[in-house]
Amino acid sequence: MRIFDPHIHMSSRTTDDYEAMAAAGVKALVEPAFWLGQPRTSVDSFVDYFDALVGWERFRASQFGIAHHCTIALNPKEANDPRCTPVLDLLPRYLAKDGVVAVGEVGFDSMTEDEEKAFSRQLDLAREFALPALVHTPHRDKLAGTRRTLDLVEAAGIEPGMVVVDHLNEVTVDVVDQAGAWMGFSIYPDTKMDPDRMVAILQRRGLDRVLVNSAADWGRSDPLRTRATGEAMLAAGFTEDDVDKVLWRNPVEFFGQSGRLLLDVPEADQGATFAGNSLLRGERA
Amino acid sequence: MNQTLLAEWCAEIEADPTRVRTRFPAAAREIGRTPGTSPAPGEDRVEDDVRVRLLSALGRGLADDADALSAEVHDLYRFGDADERRAVLLGLGHLQAALGDRAVDLLHDALRTNDPRLVAAAVGTYAARLEDAAWRQAVLKCLFVGVPLRLVAGLDVRADDELRRMVADYAAERRAAGREVPADALPLLPVPTPSTRES
């Protein structure tokens, strides 16, 4: 089983996790920029964090044979803090880089005006840099937040296929599906989704445009929930190829739209045929 | 590697040095890169060669203004990812006639990291400008993080008694812990005498 975890916060995880993930079949991942579990108080903290995402964390992952990518953004929580919002002016520096495969996590936390302003501005950046957008949906008032998200995406004039709306569940999946956006599901030990509920959604609506992630971070979470979902799919009668589509080809297709993937594992060659994907544009050594 | 585009970009940067700010980060995906995200320290990589050529073009574009060249190089490093920073470090040796000591602080920054690829890129010819104490620490750091000592420019000429003492202490600590001493440290160690030889 080859696994691409499309949403995991590795800077909060240990090398034990990297080792276990590699052993479970994880060959690539995307680490979205988010908050740190406690609020930042200055732009400089963001800069050091972004530097780690495009530097040290990429190196740590490479030691375990895992291709590390990231997304860059001002997250919705900290969009409410005037000490943090000037980081928006620095984002273009990072959105031009290899391995930066989307603008994210953007979206809503408490559905404030400031959040909406930062969200819209960053959707514009996604269009300007021809990058996909990774959208976080709120824990509270999730369905309303998801609907408002889809309105803003439409207003920004972004192709729905360039957007993944994340942390979905049984209640929010259908509106996103109908809008034509990608659907992200975070599989958690207790909250969010679990592997069996995930399988039920896949049985009901099929495998297209679905991304399954562990969203593991500094809270109680498990970087191997992607693998557990693959196993639950097999136990429910899905084929190996179905599992490969959900856990590998789908994320390669979605993030490949950036032209910035750094996948060089041999199996990734077939991924290079996806439209607009230039992951192997570099000359062969 | 797309040689035509590289030549175009070099000419562009030479004419308008600020263009390096957007060309340098995009160079690998637009001109060429060696596949793989886990290069060995010191490995020859297409994207490094490409970016060093862009830096040389920057040096020609700012040939009459060393301070402006230094500021541009510092910004490329400050806002660079690990690959871009590595290329800046590798390029310093090509720019040293113009830069003088202006970019020595970038070596210090790289040598504080634990990324062997950055450490390896920081011990090239430009490292001749490090003061003795910092240079010895850099050599020792190479041993610690697994950067082969053949990548240290001018090691044979510059290795002094103090470095040999530091490497000997390092070897003693490794042996006390029952670990191997890296083979490339051996030439720097004193010839064992009966009192220091292991039983």
Image (cartoon, coloured by chain):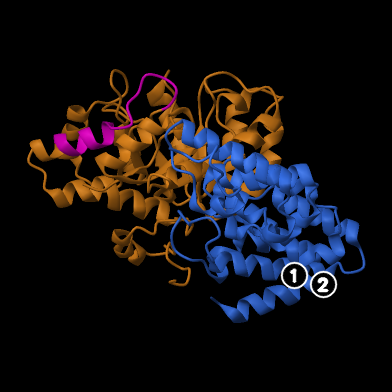
The part of the chain drawn in magenta is: A217-232
Kindly identify the amino acid type of the residue bearing the numbered disc 2.
Arg
Along the horizontal axis of the image, is A94 left or right of A272?
Answer: right
User: What is the number of the mark on residue B56?
Assistant: 1
| Tint of chain A | orange
Closer-to-camera residue (B75/A205) = B75
Q: Residue at x 47, y 41 (%)?
A: A60
Q: Residue at x 42, y 34 (%)?
A: B178
Along the horizontal axis of the image, is A194 left or right of B116?
Answer: left
Q: Does the magenta portion include B39?
A: no
Q: Are marks 2 and 1 in contact (CB under 8 Å)?
A: yes
Where residue B181 appears, as percent x and y from the top left, is 49, 44
Which corner quadrant of the image does residue A43 belong to?
A: top right
Along the horizontal axis of the image, is B157 left or right of A99?
Answer: right
Q: In the rendered image of this protein, does residue B32 appear above or below residue A37? A: below
Where residue A33 appears, as percent x and y from the top left, is 53, 36
Where residue A236 appears, as percent x and y from the top left, is 9, 36
Disc 2: host chain: B
Q: In the rendered image of this protein, does residue A152 appear above or below residue A126? A: above
Q: In the rendered image of this protein, does residue B191 appear above or below residue A117? A: below
Q: Secondary structure at mark 2?
A: helix
Closer-to-camera residue (A48/A158) = A48
Closer-to-camera residue (B71/A84) = B71
